[in-house]
Each structure stands twice: as C-alpha cells, then as structure tokens.
Amino acid sequence: MNQKNIRNFSIIAHIDHGKSTLADRLLEETGTLTDREKADQFLDKMDIERERGITIKAQAVCLNYKADNGEDYTLNLIDTPGHVDFTYEVSRSLTACEGALLVVDASQGVEAQTLANVYLALDEDLEIFPVLNKVDLPGAEPERVKEEIEEIIGLDTSDAIVASAKEGIGIHDILERIVERVPPPQGDPSAPLKALIFDSWYDSYQGVVVMIRIVDGELKKGDKIELMASKGTYEVLKVGVFSPEATPCDALRAGDVGFMIAGIKVVQDAKVGDTITHLHRRADQALPGFKEVKPMVFSGLYPIDTSEYEMLRDALEKLQLNDAAISYEPENSMALGFGFRCGFLGLLHMEIIQERLEREFNIDLITTAPTVVYNVTTVKNELLRVDSANKLPEVQYIDKIEEPFILASIHVPNEFVGSILALCEEKRGVQREIKYLTESRVMIVYELPLNEIVMDFYDRLKSISRGYASLDYEHLDYRPSKLVRMNVMINGEVVDALSLIVHQDKAQLRGRDLVSKMKEFIPRQQYVVAIQAAIGGKIIARETVKALRKDVTAKCYGGDISRKRKLLEKQKAGKKRMKQIGSVELPQEAFLAILKVKE
Amino acid sequence: MSALYLHIPFCLSKCPYCDFYSRIPQSGDIERYVDALCLDLERSRAHYLGGKFSSVFFGGGTPSLLNAHQVARLLKVAERCYGFEREVEITLEANPGTLTAQQLSGFRQAGVNRLSLGVQSLDDKQLAWLGRRHSSQQAIAAVEMARCAGFDRLSLDLMFALPLQSLADLKAQCQRIRQLSPEHLSIYGLTVESGTPFAAQQQAGLWQLPDEEAYRDAYLYLHEQLTSSAYEHYEISNFAQSQQRCRHNYSYWQRQPYLGVGAGAHSFFANRYGERWACTDSVDAYYSAIDGQESPRWRIETFTKPQAMAEAVYLALRCKDGLDVQRFEKRYAMNFVQHFSGALKRCGAHVTLRDGRCSLDVEGWLLFNYLIEDFL
C-alpha cells in the first residue's frame, strides 16, 4: 500500500463510552468482518481472551477501506490501555499513530480518565477529532458536551461527528474523517529499518508476538534484526497484520502497523518502546523515548492459606510471561509465613495483579502496604537498595537514607486548585509551577516523594476533585530524607508484615491514623486487641478493639432455624478471609489500612 | 418424637417490636382459617411421615383468638389423621389481656394441657412502652384464671434488656415470678427487627437499647436468680422447673420431625439429612392454595450431610444438655472432637466435654453467634 493511503489512528475514550462497539462497527463497515454474526464472534473471542488475560493487550487491527473519493486506504486502528500506571505504554501506542478519535458519551460528557490520554496525544502531535457517541439515547446532550470539550480540552468541536455506534449512525462519516484529517505516515521506505515496539505478549505456540510500527525502511520474513535497547539479535520468522485474524504478509514497510514473530522467548526481551533495526544495516539512532520500565512500588503478597504458596509462585510465573513490568522474589514473614516481594509499576498495577491472582488463580491473598525503593548508605559506606521496611537496618547502622522523588503534573478544574495545593503540601511536595491551560483548567506541577504517592495520594486526589483531576508523573531523582521504620504491634507483638517506612515528621500522625484505621477493620473478638504503633522502642499511638461481650440470638424456633443459621453462615463467609496472628484474627483490609482514604 | 405446629396469624393489634406477619381478623375470618387448617392437616397426611405427635403447639399471632370449639376441632382432626402419643403435650399461646375464665376452661376441656402466656413484663411502665394491651394486674389475673381452669403447666414469656430496665426492676420481677411460680419461663433479650416501628424509633434516637454490658448483667442476673430458685436454665432463653421443659421446642432443637400448618408455618421432614419446608406466609395466598387443591408448602432447604451436621451442633449447643457426642458420631460417621477441633479450641473454657456430651456454659451462650461460626 502506498504510504499516502495509510492512516494510523487510535480511539481515546472513557471506559463505558462505547469504544469497543465503535471498533466493532468500523470493522463491519469496512467489510473487515463480513457479517454481524462474525462480528459478534470476533468480539466474544476477544472477551474470553481478555477474561483469561492471555492477550489482554492485543489491540491493533488493520481495516481496508474504499473511500468516497474512490481510492483504497489501509486504516490501522491501535488501541491503548488507560491509566496513570501505564502512561508510558499508552504514549508508545500513540507514537505509532498520526491521529486519534476522541470518543465522548453524549450524555455523560468528558470524564477525568479521558483527559490524561488526550494530553498524551497532544504531546505526540496527533490530529485529534471529537466524536459524540450514543446520540440516540434519550439523555443525549451533544451541544452541552461539545461546549464541555471545547472548554476542558480546548478542542474545536464545530465539525464534531455525531454518532451512535450501537445504531450504526455516523460510522461512515468517521471513516471519511479519518481519511481526510489523519495525516499519512511520513517515513522513508528505503532508509535503514526503524520499527517501534508498542506492545508485546507471549503466545505459547509462537513465543513472543511483537506489535510494531515501521517508521523507516522495510521488514521481511528471514531478516536478521537487532533490538537496539535490549541488544538481542533474532531472525524474523513471520510478519503480518491483524485483520482481525492474524494474516501473514511478505513485508511491512514504512508507515505500516503489524506484528512480528522472531523466536523471542520472553516479553522482557521485547520491551515496549524499543527500536528494531537490521543487524547488517543498522539505523544510526534508535527512536526517541525509550524507557526501561522498572517496578516502582513493592509489596509483599502472601497466601492466606499457607499451603497455597506453590500455587502463588506458579501464578506469578504465568503472569510474568505477559507482563514485563512485574518482578517477584521469595520473602519470608514471621507473621505471614512464606510469600513474595513483588514489584509493580504503580498502585493500580498492583491492584490488577492482586485481583487477577485472586480471581483467575483463586488464591486468597494478604497484600502488605506498598513501599518504594530507598537508597540506604550504611555507616560502613555500603549502599543498600531497600524495598521493604523489614530490610531497613537498625538506626545506628544507617548513615543516610534517600528516597525517590517524582515530578507530578496534575490537571484540574480551577475550583479545586486550593485543596489540591493543600494536599501536595501535606504530602511534602515542592511546588514547581501553576499554569492556567484555559480559563477553567489548571496544571499544577509539584515535586513529590513517591513514597507519599503510593500511599493514598491518588485516591485523595480523586476524592478532592470529584474525579476530575488527572495525574501524570515522571521520575526525578533520589533525595536525602529523614525516614524511620514504624512498627505495629498487636497485643504487644511486632507484626513484621505491618511495618512501614515513614518520614520522621509525619510519623506521629501516620501512626495515629494507621492504628485508628486498623481499629475500624479489626472485628471485635473474644479478647481485647491492642494495636500500637512504635518507632524504635517508643509507642507513638495506641488503640484498643474492645472484647466482644455479647453476640447471641435470643429466639430460635421452628420457622426461624433456617433463616438464623443462614445469617450466621453469611456472617462467617464474610470473615473467612482472615489471618490468624497469635490469638488475633486480622482481616485482609487491616494489612492495607494505611492506604485507606481519610474521609 | 414428632411435633405439630399450628400457626394462627391473627392479632387484634400489632406490637411495635414484632416483625411477624399477622392481620386483624375480620368477621368469619377465623372460622374460614380453621377450615383451611383442617383441610391442610388432612391433605398433608400423605407427605408427613413423622408418626404420631408427641406435642402440639398453637402459636401465633394470637392463638387465644380461637374459641374452644375451634381448638377442639383442630385437635380432633389432627388426632384422627396422625394420632397422638399417650402423654401428648398440647400448648396454646395466649394473650393475658383478652382471656376469660370460661375460654380457659374451654381450652382445657378441648385437650390443651399447657398454656404459654405472653406476659412480656410484670411492670406496667414497661408493658406500656412495649405497646401491650394488658397490665401487670391482668397478667397476674390470667395466671390465676389458668390455674383455676386446671392448667398445671404454665409458661410465661418475658423480655429483658429493655431501655430503662434497671437491675432493681429485674429483681422485682424475679420476686413476682417466684410468687407466681410458673412451671416454665421463656425470657428474651429485646431484639429490634428491621422494618418494625421500634426500628424507626431507635433510628430516630428516641431511645437506646442497653449496651452489651447491661445486657450481660441482666442475663447473668436472671440466670443466677432463677437457677437458685428451682429453675433449670435449659436453653439460651428458656427456664423450666424440674420435668417441665417444653417438649415441643426441645424437639426442634433435636432436629426431630415436625409438621407446621397455617400461613407462614415451617415444617421439618427427617428423611435423609432433612428437609425444611415453609407455607406461604400470607393468609390469602394460603387460602387460595388450599382452595385450589394445591399444596401451600414448598421446600426451602434440603440438607447435605455437612449442613445437617452444622445445624445439629448449632441447635444442640443452644441447650444445656448440649450435644450427645456418641449419637452424633454414629449418625454422621465421623469423629466429633477431631472434626471440630478448631471450633472447639476457639470456645476455650466455655465448652465442656463430659459424660459423652459437649455443651457451652452461660458465658459461652452470651457469645453464641461468635463461637458457633466455626462449627458452621
């Protein structure tokens, strides 16, 4: 296909605003799927795969389209994940495009989630055009939503497309608009090969499948290639496109989007953002923007039932096949037994993994409070990287501790600026910049300790701004800080899995907060439960869960027996996921109490 | 052992703490209802295989709204269809406010040999607060009338843990109980059921239930007082003089079969690990099932072995006699102590294994719901 007839685009949309239905319609309209039935099948298959998490990120489809001007076009639709933890992956997917559809539900309006991706797309200089979806719904207010898009995002909506993916309204217009407005790719097909990896996943038959965008040059089966960042060299076994089934082709050329299989064994060897070039005709420079994705947040994962340790290890191994960003190593806790210290991109990534382990692998877990990686210099001048409070040496052996800082950009409607600034100050932030993007939207830039972000920052941000603040961050540097280990004692015994690293000035407050939150989560038991927070030998906070004194159903006769017994069974099921620590039963939530938002 | 429960879902007014279905009887309503009960008794014969009844219980609602003739008729049908054991216990629940001497002797003559009086309190202040229609004088008069009518088995229903009920109040009531000397007492801590007027009042902050400590104090005081004056505390909420336990309720706790007739009545069939059935709880739906020759009863639970085991333990531990370990092990072919080792450990000093029986002490009863969880 001639480059000038290729259009690479993505769809930016909030979760329920109809992205997958729209994608489905575009496939149908272009005849990529010939009939409804096939379309349903296609989506169903994707759903099952998504549920099983096998190709959770496989999202680039090639559409062939004959435009009204009579010419044939190849439209490559590239999908993106959507959360702050995956900002980097999203940015790479967007780099592979020249344009983006901004799909907004005509009754819901712009949602916070959409914004961060729009800004990323603007950063990549993408041509963005708005589509108002679900106009067939009775509550649709396309005019109001148009205004909102203009005001919040600053995008011209005078020619926004009004559509209903469900009813098939506006689909043709969208395709025409893509052809008209999205610029064709600019690449030199005869230059040395430069191909961008924007996604990869593991397939048990073919090894790693790599999604690529050819920027310059041409890639064929049999080519000897090199991955410029990870330095691996491979021979290409297959190239092709998804349309929507995997369809091999002879070659991918500058401007094309497709897949490559090259006998790569693990996803860690085909990192998102890496550049593929030819081994014998190398590009002098890799594509810009590659970042080594490193886990930033660590926490301990322990099976509640200690006999499920092996199961947990197998599950983590399986998840890692498809997720280059998680790491894990065995860890041992006095309180929780054998488990793993796992590294994640961020809090959401952690929650996703935790949920998948519980849902897909059926393992009940205790997750300990997340921590970042600290650089500790001992008095003997050794440098330690500490990713767990329990690995922090005793005070007398520490010369200095450094903690990671990030540069956080927060986009927010101006009415929330005051409270967001207060939050950033509370979190030990250093203000860099406050900028009015439009009359009503503000960008607040702060240097913040990552340690504060992984606690409750994001939840607080969302609750303060009623969901309208969006957060993006990049890593800055390590800075010396006064940090201490805070231990938590249950009935006088230190529970290692509850230890935290906190800033000295915040210790008192954190300690008080933590024990009072834990008190809420620990149900009353037969005996008194004392919860204490301590630094060194000094108790800084204490709460008591009073003993249960009375819990009895007075009446139990013929008709009531089933009902009352079932009530107790239900109550019991709710308490099943508790961990016995000494004589005390702690629920899962107690271990993550530190994360719970202060209301 | 096999029991019959007859449910009479009529009340002249609704008590503010009660969440049972009931309705105010219209003229002819009760007669029609008794007709339906008789038909239900006849037709259930084919399904109920529990054998002769060793106890019959008229519960409600307000069963004393029936006249003696109606009671006699129901008992006659029941006896004809199923048979009664020789020493059959026949209990009728009655409201002290509306009883007459004549009515009582009528019930006695009809075959009722045990009367359960819904006294609730022997303190006028508390009776008024509970929204009851009778006074403590009327309650005492009802006891005397019952004695005169020949009832030598009397049970009183009482409540404790009421707002503003002090230990001194309880003490005075215990004194009165000793004077009246009923053979049996059912004493319940007040529970606020959702959807009742009490629930709304409580939510509006009009009053507060006594806290856990006050509940405990009252419960332990009653236990102390009554066990030291010839009563046996034989179930969490029940006290009896020697040989005066309620056989009917005891058969519920032993998972013996029972047939329940009437709107809202439950039945338990003992085939395999047991089945529990329920009748529709509206009177009109009950009528239309009976009129339409349909069964008003449907199965709400079929027990598996583990469920049956759990329920057997759950019910037995509510009783002072506790669980007969050997019988249990034989019935379910398993080792009790081994199977429930964790749960038993949790009970700590509150559980006793002695003479082949496993039982909880009074403190254990106070934590019953908490301790029993691990057995379920």
Image (spheres, coloured by chain):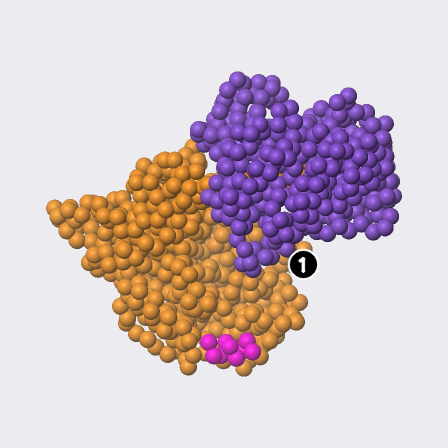
Q: Residue at 44% across / 36% down in the picture?
A: A305
Q: Is residue A283 visible?
A: no
Q: Is residue B203 above or below residue B54?
A: below
Residue A3 pos. (x, y %): 48, 68
Please identify which colour was used for chain A in the image.
orange
User: Please, what secondary structure does the residue beneath circle 1 have?
Assistant: helix
Residue position for label 1: A36
- Horizontal relation, residue A395 to residue B252: left or right: left
Tag 1 subunit: A
Residue B94 pos. (x, y %): 73, 40
Q: Nearer the viewer, residue A345 or A398?
A: A398
Q: Main secondary structure of the magenta part?
A: helix
Residue B320 pos. (x, y %): 56, 27
Identify the magenta region. A144-152
Please identify which colour was used for chain B in the image.
purple
Q: Quadrant of the C terminus of chain A?
A: bottom left
Q: Residue at 32% across / 59% down in the picture?
A: A452
Magenta region includes residue A582: no
Q: Residue at 40% across / 55% down in the picture?
A: A596
Q: Is residue B17 above or below residue B76?
A: below
Residue B60 pos. (x, y %): 73, 42
- Residue projecting furthest to the left: A380
Q: Amino acid at mark 1?
A: Arg
Q: Is residue A11 above or below residue A322?
A: below
Q: Nearer the viewer, residue B164 or A246?
A: B164
Q: Residue at 65% across / 70% down in the picture?
A: A137
Q: Nearer the viewer, residue A247 or B20?
A: B20
